[in-house]
Structure formats: structure tokens, C-alpha cells
Amino acid sequence: MVSPCLSQVVSSPCLVRHNAAMNDASTATSTSANSDGEPQSAAHQAVLKQLRSLLPESSVITDRSGLKPYETDGLTAIREMPWVVVLPETEAQVAAVVRCCAQHGVPVIARGAGTGLSGGARPHAQGVVLGLSKMAAIEEIDIDNRVARVQPGVRNLAISQAAQEYGLYYAPDPSSQIACSIGGNVAENAGGVHCLKYGLTVNNVLGVRVVLADGEIVELGGALYDNPGPDLLALLCGSEGMLGIVTQVTVALLPIPETKAVLLAGFAKVVDAGNAVADIIGSGIIPAGMEMMDKLAVQAAEAFAKAGYPLEAEAILIIELDGAEAELASLTDQVKALLQRNGAYQIDEAHDASTQARLWKGRKSAFPAVGRLSPDYLCMDGTIPRKALPGVLTEIDTISQRFGLAVANVFHAADGNLHPLVLFDANEPGQTDKAMAMGAKILEACVAAGGTITGEHGVGVEKLDTMCVQFTSAELEQFFRLKAAMDPQDILNPGKGIPTLTRCGELGGMHVHNGRLPFPDLERF
Amino acid sequence: MDQICSAAADKQKLLIQGHSSKRGWMTPARGDYVLDLTAHQGILQYQPEELVLTARAGTPIVEIEQTLAAQRQMLASEPPCLAGNPARSGTLGGAVASGLSGPGRPWLGAVRDGVLGVELINGKGEYLRFGGQVMKNVAGYDVSRLQAGAWGCLGVMSVISMRVQPWAETQCTLSAAMTAQAATALCAELGRRNLPITGSCWYLGVLYLRLAGNDSGVAAGIAALAAMGLAKTEAVPSLWQQLKNHEHRFFYRNENPHGDAGEGENRSGDADATRGSTLWRVITPPAAPQPEFLANPDQDLLMLWGGGLRWLYHHDAQAVKHYSQQVGGWCWALGDSLPVDPVSKRIMDQLGLAFDPDGVFAHPLDLGSTATPAQGGRG
């Protein structure tokens, strides 16, 4: 399903380095007693005046120190100081702000917790940052209908925490769940370790209220399992703030699994681990989570988290099984047998919460762990069909040797969502460009293997160029028409997500042809 | 694709057609020519351990089911194979376009949840690929899942990739007599527990539950539910199949079960039992109260999805609509246009133009409660 039209991908001029530490949620504190910064233009002054009339004083930030936390999101390499940030407290205020911006033709950049990894919440020089952090109320937990109605600023984990006393939880658990917001999850169609069994955000959201580009409010879905017409709710999930601003989410709640088992298996060969994954799925078992790490990632994680990982394994699998007590014992036995059949030389098993947490700790701290190995790293986000995993890993290894930069791999093994982490030192001349070129080559390899360039982090600004690789001009134009249908003025998060065709052409990232090209020769060194 | 381009050039309308298995469900679309997709069939790729099947849109669902069954797999959303003519009981494209999910929807997912990728031809005759063969795909807008429920108004689907699901090790059905009200209350309670339930149906005063999972899990589930008075039953051996395919006799009370739009006034077959009543598909929050106008629920009500889908017969459209709205749901009489609020309709119309700027495709998604009458051109 992917365009075979690959061509030379030039590194994106924006991305330089990915900070190893994940940003915490940045909430503004506009307590500065200084006078507000004066916006440059008359147009901005008019907008600011209107914003101040629409919102409480504490919801409009213009002073430099108050604005600073909003200049970036989880992709800290990309920064842009906004000239104003607003923090509405109600849906009506959100709509009023959007209407005001629409009137003046000013872009609106929605922002959840600012933990996104693709620069999707990067401010626009002319635009208004609209933060949803003040809309953080859990409005209702409806245990009979098994839904929670929450405001967009509610943290992902907070939903499960609130539902816990009723024996319910919210399944999608991106690794930033302690900080990320549910509104942001919708915008990015966030996944998480458990998405193999429980799905992505789109599979767990039953309704939203949205403020559209003209300030109109629409309610899609509800506590319902079915809705009429084309699935607008699905369209909104993953739309990265470009089609509307979510002001309420109705999420599905599931019964908390009675029990869990976590298995850790060590393999002497990467391909064996890949085969084990295929074997488990092929036998009709869908684990709650299945993660793989390669040797470099394991060693880094072990040094950081001391989880008891086998240091000499070429690859490890961490598998979580959950469900009712009655079903789990035979399920665990089945999986262990399959692991052994595929050459696992070591299998650890955890049934109590603290050991389970220890086994997971390494995987969950993989990113900061790898960040200790080198001054900088680039976190790639691609997805490939499961069966292509061993081949792509070999290709990544080849690319790594060709470029002379190390790469550690962590991934959601069960659906092939890859995070190759390219290690480099930005202070060394030329290494940044090399790292980015290498990252692009890795993503090309994913696309060539039948996958896609982003599994879960979104496109934002970071991956605009590689979008040119994955989509044809006709497809990109279709995206634009779709966007124009919902936001004719292009004021919602403009310049993100979908590259303009000129960008694709200018950077040499895409040869525009009428039909599809056969596979061009790959670059040779 | 040529057909589409020439239709655009001649300002004709093309009617996208598969098996027309759901013809009676919607207001009929009117086109000048038919774009017949039934020959466009065939499974292109299927690997069980990938949990993905890719097929051309004209592939019969029946064929897909057989192929999957041989590997002990299934389409999780259990789309209907509508009886009548078994050879034309529904295509993959039609299943996605109509977005009708099966009896396991709350537990196994909706049609939309199973769509991984779509290749489609828009109204400009362009061949476009969206999504892929993997579950996680946030590059670009989710055009693939948007197709679910679009009834063809956003282009012609050519190839579709669906996520598939392994069969459970074992399956059985339990039942117990109870009122509809008690059934929804029980389902709400059970929904908070770890039980291997994958389907529920209330009909004629009996609640049926489908259990599916591994042997030990199901055995434990049976024991737990036995304590609540539910026992194994073989009373209706192919109950879930019948429900999935709308073959269940509940749907056949009237002479024309799914209504033919042109024969609305003849919908009541039996004057005594039905008294001019229409079949309504009502979607509600699962724990919503029963409608008070249902004098005779045993005759007039079939509940699925733990209460989230209520098929009912009633003569008073206003009462049904009022009830649906009150409980936060919606209702649809088969053969009528889909009820969509004005703002959503505006979005859908605009999206339709985005995919079909020249209005080449005639589609039945006449959301016509608002001003502009659909005349064949676009407003």
C-alpha cells in the first residue's frame, strides 16, 4: 500500500537533536508582575485586545518568562517563542478564541501537555498558542455505560486512577501517560505498550466535542458503539490539531484485568526473537504487550535501571499476558513453550506486581538509558509488517555500519512499531547531518518493507520530508482538499503534518510524476 | 478509473455497486451508469501471523470468511452476509462502506476498528493509497477509517486491508429468562468483571450471552454465571450467525424485512401483530432505560451489544426519535436516510466534495434533513 516512488531524501533542516530526557508537562504560571510584552503589529494588538476581553486575565500570557515554557514540546530541538499563549477554562472560551483568530486570520496552535515528540505543538510565529491545561476536569465516570467523560487537559493516567475504585481503567498507555493529556492522545492517536490487544486511542474513544476552525462546536458520537455516516471520530484521531480542537472526550473504560503475567526471554539471535513473535501470534494468542530490545538497548537499559536483563542476549522479548485468573495459567504455559521452541535460552517469569514492574522498568526507561550512551540521539518512529522485522533490523545494522553511527533498537514487537535510536554527538562536525541522513535512510527501509514512517509519534514538523516519500502528490493533494473542507482558512496548526508539494519538490525529496515510478536505484556509497 | 474520468467529463453520475445486498437499507441512490465492482475481487494477501488480510473490494465476505476460517481466524467485527441470494450476500467494500458491526461490537470492535488501509479512487479518477497493513499509522489523516460508514460518498474503494482476529479456543452460549430491563442491568454489571463475554442478545424474554476464550477461562466464566442463573443452552444453535446475518426471525415479521423504500406503506404484513409498524435500528448507551412506548417488548424488541443496539418495531416515528434523543442515542428506520446533525452533515458534505469535487458518484448518503435537496448535482 505504499508508494514505491522512493528517491533521495534530504535531511530535514529543522531537526537537530532529540533531548534524552522527556519533558514534563509544562503548565504556565503567568505570575510575572512585569508589564506584558507588546506585540509587534497592529493586527496582533487587535487580537490581543479581543482575547483579553474574552478570557480571564490569568488565561492570557504575554510576558516572556510566562511564554518560555511554550516555545517547544517534547521535541526540544525545535523552538519558537510564541507572542501570546491563552489558557481557556471552558469550551465556550475555546470557541470564542478560535472565532477571534478566524476573524483575524491568525493561526491557532492547540497544545495539550506539550509532551509530543514530533513538534506538533511548536508555536507559529504569527499564531496563538491555545493550551488546554486548564480544562483538566474529569466530568463523569459512568460505570453502567463504562465510559468516562473528561476534559482534554486530563492526564492519560489520571483517567485510570479515577476509574480504579470501580474496577475499571482506560487502556491506551503511551509511555508518557503520567504527563500526556487525553486531548493530545486524540490528536496523535496515541498507542502504547498495550495497543496490540487493546487498540489505539481511536479504538477506545466513543465520542468527542470539537471546536471547528470557524468556532462552531460539534459533538461526534457519545456513549455509543455506532454512529451514522462516515467516521468523523476516526478522522479526528490522529489529525494533530489540524481539523479541530477537542474540548471533551468520552473514552471507553474496560474492567481492570484480574491478573497479569510478565515474561522476559533472552535470545542468542535476533531472527529467533522475531520468529517467536510470529509464532505466538500465529498460534492465536494476542498478548497484552510484546516488546523487543536489541543488545545495545538492553545493555544501556540494564546500566540505567538494573532490571536484571541478560546482557549477552542479542535480543530480548518482554511479554505481558493479562486476563482472568482462570485463563492465565494455560496461556502462560503456551507462550513459554513457544518461546522455548524458538530458541529462547532464558525465560524469567513474574507474577507479582513489583517483579513485573522491575522487568518493565528497563524497557520503559529505554530512551533515557540510551541517552546516557552518547551526548545526543535521534529517535526514529517507523512501523513495518511483523514478518519484515528481521530483515529490516539487518538493513539497519548495515546502514549503521555504513554511516559509522551506533543504533539501539527498541520496539513494539507485536505490531512492528520501531524506535531505532541513532546515537551521535552534535558537537562533532558533520555528525548531526549524518545522523539525520541515517535516520531518513532507516525510515526509507521501513517504507520499502511495506511500512509507514510514523507509528505513533505523529508527523508534526519533524517528519514532513519523509511524508514526501510515503505519499504521492495526488494523495497529498487529497489530504489538502480534506483539510480545506474543514479548515478553509488553514488556521488550525498550519504547516504541520502534511508537507506542501513545493517542499517535496524543492528539497529533492520527491520526483513528481503522473504515474508511479518503478523502484529507482538506491544511493550507493 | 477510465469510467470515472469519462463520467466526470460527461457530467454523468456513477452508481457504485457491489452486491447491493443492503439495497433496502438506505434511500436509493440514483446514477446514470453503474460502476459494477463485483468482478473486482480476489484476496491479494493473507498471512495469519500478521493478522492482516488484503483483498479487492468486490470480494464476497463469504469467501473471506471461509479463507479465514481455514486458519481459525475471523473478521473481528463480524460484518453481515445478508441472505436472499447467497452469491450476492455482501462484498468487503460494502461491509466497510456500510459500517454495520456484528453482535460482538462492544467486545471485538467495530468495522471501523478493523480497517487498516484502503486503496481508493476518488471522483477525479485518481488512485490513492491510505493507511497500510499495520495497525499504527498516524501519517496523514485517517482516510481509511473514515470510509467506514461512508456508503461510498468518499470515493470508490478498490483494495482494503483488514485486521483479523484468531478464533477463541472454545465458545458457548448461556441463557436465562429475564425482562429487558433486567438484562441491561445485568450486562452493565457483567461488563465490569473479567468474563470472557463476546456477545449478548435479549429476545422474547430471554438473555443470551456468548462466551469465547480459552478452555479454562470459559469454564470459569460458565461457573461464575451459573451462580447468577445462567445456564448453557443450545436452544438456538446458530443464534449468533443468525444475528450477524440478519436471518433471525425477529427481522422477518414484516413481509419486507428491510423495507423497500418505495413500499413503505406496505411494511406491515400482519395487521394484528405489527399494525403498520416500522423496523427501527436504535443505538443507545447500553444501560439506557427501555422506551416506555414498548407495550409488548417480547414481540417488538431485539437487544444486542449489552443494550447498545436495540432493534424495535413501532408505528410512531416521533416517539422513537424522541426516545432516542432523550437517552443520548439515535435511530434509523431502514430505508430512510441517516439522521445526522446539521453541523456534522455540513462536514460530511464538504468532505464529499473534497473527494468528489465534480459530483461523479451517486451515493445513498442523502443526509437530507437540511435545506438543499439532493437532485443529482451538488448544492
Image (cartoon, coloured by chain):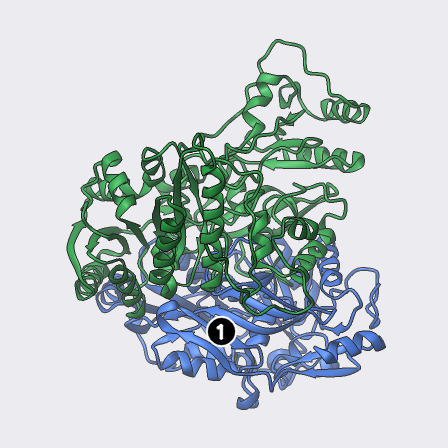
Q: Position of residue B121 (x, y in %)?
A: 66, 71
Q: Where is residue B301 in the image (x, y as percent from the top left)?
A: 53, 70
Q: Residue reaching furthest front?
A: A525
**Residue at which label 1 appears:** B54
Residue found 56% across the figure and 81% down from its top: B90
Q: In this view of the protein, can residue B302 be seen by the observer?
A: no
Q: In this view of the protein, can residue B322 be seen by the observer?
A: yes
Residue found 77% across the figure and 78% down from its top: B30
Question: Which quadrant, please, contains the N terminus of chain B?
Answer: bottom right
Q: Position of residue B173 (x, y in %)?
A: 34, 73
Query: For the residue carrying disc 1, how many other residues have a C-alpha within 10 Å: few (<14), some (14-19), or many (20+)?
Result: many
Which structural element holds mark 1?
Answer: strand
Tell me, by letter, which chain the rendering colours blue.
B
Residue found 80% across the figure and 74% down from its top: B8
Looking at this view, is B67 or A206 the one in front? B67
Q: Where is residue A438 in the image (x, y as percent from the top left)?
A: 45, 48
Count of residue discs: 1
- Could you tell me which chain the residue with mark 1 belongs to? B
Question: Is residue B228 shown above or below A44?
Answer: below
Residue flagged by tag 1: what amino acid is it?
Answer: Thr
Query: For residue B35, what is the image quadrant?
Result: bottom right
Question: Is residue B29 shown above or below B358?
Answer: below
Q: In this view, does B84 lie to the left or right of A43?
A: left
Question: Which quadrant, please, contains the C terminus of chain B?
Answer: bottom right
Looking at this view, is A328 or A288 the one in front? A288
Query: For residue B14, what is the image quadrant?
Result: bottom right
Looking at this view, is A245 or A375 the one in front? A375
Question: Is residue A131 shown above or below B48?
Answer: above
Q: Find chain A in the image and tell me its colour.
A: green
Residue found 28% across the figure and 72% down from its top: B169
Query: For residue B40, what is the image quadrant?
Result: bottom right
